[in-house]
Amino acid sequence: MKKIIAFSFVAAMGWLSAEACTSLIAAKGATKDGSVMITYAADSHTLYGDMPSAPAADHRPGEMRKIFDWDSGRYLGEIPQPAHTYSRIGHVNENGVAMAESTWGGREELTGSGIIDYGSLIYITLQRARTAEEALNVMTELVEKYGYASSGESFTIADPDNVWIMEMTGKGKDDKGAVWVARRVPDDCIAAHANQSRIHQFPLKDKSGETRYSKDVISFAREKGYFNGKDEDFSFSNAYDPVDPSTTRSCDGRVWSFYNKFVPGMDEYLPWVLEAKGEPMPLWMKPEKPVSLSDIQWMMRDHFENTPMDMTQDIGAGPYKVPYRWRPMTFEVDGKEYLHERAIATQQTGFSFVSQMNNAHPDAMKGILWFGTDDANTCVYMPIYCSITEVPRQLAVGNGDLYNLSWDANFWVNNWVANQAYHKYDKMIQDIRPVQKALETAMQAEADSLKGVVAALSPSEASKLLTDRSAYWAQKATSDYKQLGEYLLIKYIDGNIKREKDGEFQRTETGMPVSPVYGGYDEKYFRSIVNDPDGGERLRVKDKE
């Protein structure tokens, strides 16, 4: 009983264990509609996909906020509340400020000893910031005053006009502070980070204000023996998160795949990704043409398809071209180490989103979280508007958890669909895509049509309408996927595939089921059996004498 109570309490507080996350970025001049877009995949083997929120509030003098570490639930301390905090729905606030992160850890001895961990830093900041630049100031002031309690992190901080990447690490047990650097992504560029520090050299005298850093970011590295060159040659990444071939491949590989979709000539950086050789990829790049909301959503579903790391092509994909690999990610055979690829889309995602911020939208919808639970590849990205006052039931904290299944929770229904597909991927994904695409197309069309309607409403009327529409789509996406899961179970049960015609399973003239198609295997799989020293000869049909 105590374990269940403790688990429910942790879920209610919204703590995460984001072990390996991905954040993609498109500045407003790099998108087709002029939106700033950022993404987040909260990937963890112990993370339930729901949406913690906090209403706007006024606070009395002396009122305190308790801080609990996201990853462990450990109580860290408390800080004073400001006079007013803004409402927050997931990772976006009422002002259209959105934030994401990815953990890179870095040097173990630098894990912070303050009271503000990386997750709490995000949620606290969203409740205190009106713009991305203000959020950057809030974050750095908080860790300077109260100390940083985590290891190395990359943060994405965005509003309808600007998007920043900030990288931060603690200073160890003897100093509660942090060292950090932040850079504004140019308006015509895309960028990304994925569990590897990506800021290398940066301008030390940037009069534009688009590069900022802690005053001791270089001197602290010198003091610790991480750097001894000229200031202008200082690389934040090299000093605080040195790379090796396994980290560039599993982390920067995801960044490379994003760039590779939209920027020509990315083969130039394959030596860096595959072997940590040559020049690192730029922090940002200009896409060949502007990207759309759907482009970014589909990028979150990437498994390196049609690249040298294509996860559907090696023997690990099996006969059904499954682009997933179960943990551990590395393994050893005959004294040599090998690895599985780590793609953007992965099975252990708790939730993900694509955030679309645009000042041309009415205030009530200038920030939209296109939010999905479980695997980004098979989820449906539902609209969560920045002004809504209630989280849809299907996404609400307390509606199920990792130990308690709820058929009314989007997370559990999506898991049912995804986990069926993991066994016959190349066949089942063809049944999932039409349902997924139809829902997302309808949702995006409605969001576009709502702009004119919402612009004519009062703030309270707009908020109520958008709260209702977010609830409608969360319910419909969950219900439609429940039906999809039932369909997949019936169609593919026991390794067979039921025959269909005009959308109906076929029957004989007497009403009996028609003999199914047998799923079978591909030639590559058969050859792997033949070439297996423990199986091939044993299974061979012997010639007649």
Image (cartoon, grey):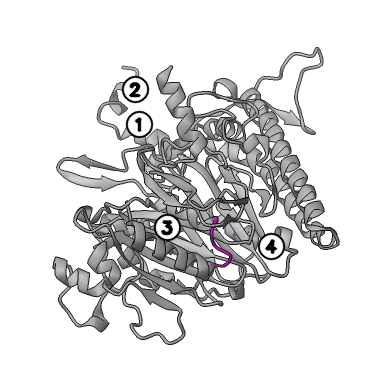
Q: Amino acid at mark 4?
A: Lys
Q: Which residue is mark 4?
A: 366
Q: Which residue is mark 1?
A: 529
Name the residue nearer the viewer: 100 or 398. Answer: 398
Name the residue nearer the viewer: 353 or 4. Answer: 4
State the image coordinates of residue 146 (x, y, percent, origin top left): 35, 56
Proximity of marks 3 and 2: CB atoms separated by less than 8 Å: no
Crowding near pointer 1: few (<14 within 10 Å), some, many (20+)?
A: some
Badge 3 or badge 4: first in the primary sequence: 3
Question: Residue shown at 77%/44% (left/top)?
Answer: 468
Proximity of marks 1 and 3: CB atoms separated by less than 8 Å: no
Q: Nearer the viewer, mark 4 or mark 1?
A: 4
Using the rendered image of the protein, determine whether residue 253 is visible from the camera's viewpoint. Answer: yes
State left or right for residue 25 relative to residue 392: left
Judged from the image, the secondary structure of the residue bearing numbered disc 3 is helix
Badge 3 or badge 2: first in the primary sequence: 3
- The Cα–Cα distance between marks 1 and 3, rounded to whole angstroms, is 32 Å
Q: Which residue is mark 2?
A: 539
Q: Nearer the viewer, mark 3 or mark 4?
A: 4
Quarter of the image for residue 537 reads top left
Judged from the image, the secondary structure of the residue bearing numbered disc 1 is helix
State the image coordinates of residue 338 (x, y, percent, origin top left): 26, 46
The label number, if any, that marks residue 254 in the structure image: 3
